[in-house]
Structures are given as C-alpha cells and as structure tokens.
Image (cartoon, grey):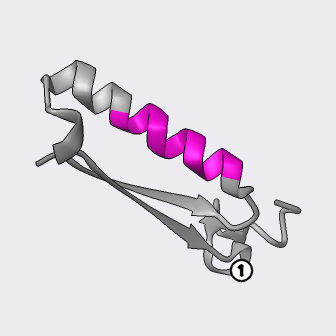
Amino acid sequence: MPFAQIYMLEGRTEEQKKAVIEKVTQALVEAVNAPVNTVRVLIQEVPSTNWGIAGVSAKDLGR
C-alpha cells in the first residue's frame, strides 16, 4: 500500500487539494504499478508561521 504524505502551506482551495490527491495517486499507480485502490495520500497543511525558509518564517516572507 503506497502512502504519500504531502506538506503544504495553508491556503490552497479544496479543488487544488483534490487535484494534488488525484495526480499523486496516478503517479504512484504508474511508477510502482500499484492498484489504485491501495494508494493513500495525506495532505497536511501548515500555518505560514510554522514554516521556515532560510531562517525566516514563510509568513514574514509574505508567503
């Protein structure tokens, strides 16, 4: 059972997250020949204050 865990900054729409789930699922099906019904995808949204880039929070960088 392939399991993909995706971390993203908060703010994506439901439609965007659905697209990520669909495309990651399809990529795993194609890459490892996994049956589609065995693929799991988890999206974890992280507040921009909790995401650091080069020592600065994503919020402070305007992201």
**Rendered location of residue 50, percent (x, y):** 62, 79
Q: Is residue 48 magenta?
A: no
User: What type is the residue that disc 1 sits on?
Assistant: Thr
Is 24 displayed left or right of 19 in the figure? left
Compared with 46, 41 (above or below) is above
Callout 1: SS: helix
Residue beneath the point at 76% across and 63% down: 11
Is 4 displayed left or right of 35 in the figure? right
**Residue 46 vs residue 29, the one in the foreground:** 29
Is 33 displayed left or right of 25 in the figure? left
**Rendered location of residue 15, percent (x, y):** 69, 48
In the picture of the structure, the residue carrying the numbered disc 1 is: 49
Give the image quarter of residue 62.
bottom right
Q: What is the residue that sits farthest to the right in this orientation? A: 62
Q: Is residue 19 magenta?
A: yes
| Marker count (numbered) | 1
Magenta span of residues: 15-25
